[in-house]
Amino acid sequence: MNVISNEIDTSLILNEDLINKYCLFNNEIYEGSKLNNMLRFDYLEYLPNDILTKVDRASMYFSLETRTPFLEKNLINYISSIPNNIKLKNKKNKYILKKILGNYLPIEMFDRKKMGFGMPVTQMINHDLKEWSEDLLSEYNLKKSGFFNVANILKIYKDHKSYKKVNPNIIWSILNFQSWYLKNFN
């Protein structure tokens, strides 16, 4: 089961009780398909509370005006009505948009691997923020919240530190949650 990430089976890091009780895309909580539930979550939570906030701050800092034409209400409503097998045709996202763009632009301009602006998380976790990381990911602190499968997280962290299997995004997410949780509920 995967409830918070596309990088790891979350049953490895979360308590099973929590997954069953609070699975965000459980159809008992939301009506409709899991894909539409994920899209709805993006529209209502992730975009306004994360991505759009960052774009707004960065663009205001440089006196830029930005637009979000794909977030127009009528377009979102129309997209919601499109069958899932077209939204994710052959497990490729943005299928419709790419078909349209293919009429105007060379495919190599838009059909490529996503490129982000990543931080040197592994370096930070293993060196610069090592003490902070080890404190937050200690068995004692991981048990405080009751949210995590402590043994699995300790193994993931150990493998990461030894470069056996590097998982910077997973560990970074857990570190941020732990920091927030211990600050607010300790």
Image: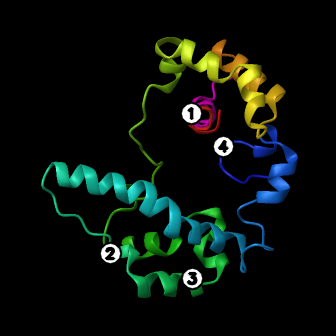
174 in magenta = yes
- Is residue 103 visible in the rendered structure shown here? no
Quarter occupied by residue 23? bottom right
Q: Which residues are magenta?
A: 165-177
* 87 lies above or below 170: below
Crowding at dot 2, Cα within 10 Å, few <14 / some 14-19 / many 20+, comes out as few
Q: Which residue is mark 1?
A: 183
Q: Are marks 1 and 4 in contact (CB under 8 Å)?
A: no
Residue shown at the point (73%, 36%) measured from the top left: 145
Work out whether residue 154 or residue 80 is closer to the camera in this orientation and state it.
154
Task: Give percent across and percent down for residue 65.
Answer: 17, 63
Q: Which residue is mark 2?
A: 69
Residue shown at the point (44%, 54%) measured from the top left: 50
Marks 1 and 3, how far apart at CA: 39 Å
Q: Which residue is mark 3?
A: 80
Task: Give percent across and percent down for residue 75.
Answer: 43, 84
Q: Earlier in the sequence, mark 3 or mark 4?
A: 4
